[in-house]
Amino acid sequence: MKEIADMAMKIFNAYEDYYLDRDKAKIFETLFDKYLTIVNEDGKTEPYDAIVWLAINHRPDFDEMVKVLKDHSLITD
């Protein structure tokens, strides 16, 4: 669970760090729309919590989201 919490925090912090960079923010928004809506249909859950729920309940989707973020150098290991 610590691994999930750490990665969720890393993703959330990167999202906040790149929020004003339109191109990078667009990547996050696209991924969040694709993956976080799986666990957050009404959009009321905070991104960090939705990321954790995604990892717990839909690990392959979480892993794919992490891979895309790493491929775009938005997060590191």
Image (cartoon, rainbow, N blue to C red):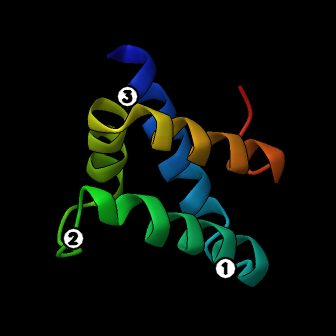
Mark 1 packing: few (<14 Cα in 10 Å), some, or many (20+)?
few
Q: Secondary structure at mark 2?
A: loop
Q: Which residue is mark 1?
A: 20
* Horizontal and vertical percent position of residue 57: 26, 35
Asked if the residue at tag 3 contacts the one at tag 1, i.e. Cβ–Cβ closer than 8 Å, the answer is no
Going by the numbered disc 1, the residue's amino acid type is Leu
Name the mark nearer the viewer: 2 or 3.
Answer: 2
Residue 40, by quadrant, is bottom left
Q: Which residue is mark 2?
A: 41
Reading the chain from its start, which is encountered first: label 1 or label 3?
Answer: 3
Name the mark nearer the viewer: 1 or 3.
Answer: 3
- Which residue corresponds to the image point at 66% horizontal and 79% vertical from the top-left? 20
Q: Which residue is mark 3?
A: 5
Going by the numbered disc 2, the residue's amino acid type is Glu
Q: Which mark is residue 37?
A: none
Mark 2 packing: few (<14 Cα in 10 Å), some, or many (20+)?
few
* Horizontal and vertical percent position of residue 46: 26, 60
- Which residue corresponds to the image point at 68% horizontal and 69% vertical from the top-left? 27
